[in-house]
Image: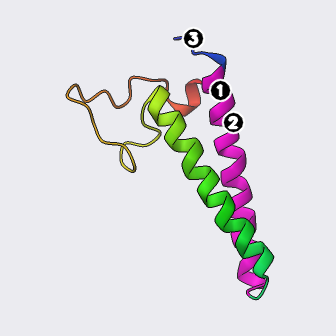
Amino acid sequence: MKQLPEKYYLLLEEIQAIDFVLLELALYIDTHQTDQLAMQQFNQYVQYSKHLKQAFEAEFGALLQYGNSYTDANWSWGTTPWPWQV
């Protein structure tokens, strides 16, 4: 298995943590639709999640086969380890 830099694992873990926070906030807001603070926090975490994913993809390649990234001329999608490999 290809050894990746520590930053790869740190960014991936932070992305997973922030996306978990977003899921929990969304569930909370579903039942507390007037909680403006929760909605504000949700929007802040959405922006932070986008920032983290852009930083990750700029350095390590696409997180998904589709999404915010465009392919390169070599179709290098999938050249980094799959999630179950890290």
Label 3 amino acid? Answer: Gln
Secondary element under disc 1, as helix, strand or loop, is helix
Label 2 amino acid? Answer: Glu
Q: In the image, what residue occupies the spot 60% across and 15% down?
A: 5
Secondary element under disc 2, as helix, strand or loop, is helix
Residue at which label 2 appears: 13
Secondary element under disc 3, as helix, strand or loop, is loop
Residue at which label 3 appears: 3
Quick one: label 1, few (<14), some, or many (20+) residues within 10 Å?
few
Residue 67 appears left or right of 14: left
Q: In the image, what residue occupies the spot 38% across and 23% down?
A: 79
The part of the image, by quadrant, that contains residue 11 is top right
Tell me which segment is drawn in magenta: 7-33
Q: Which disc, if any, is residue 9? A: 1
Estimate the spatial distance between the alpha carbons at disc 1 and disc 2, rounded to whole Å: 6 Å
**Residue 10 within the magenta-colored segment of the rendering:** yes
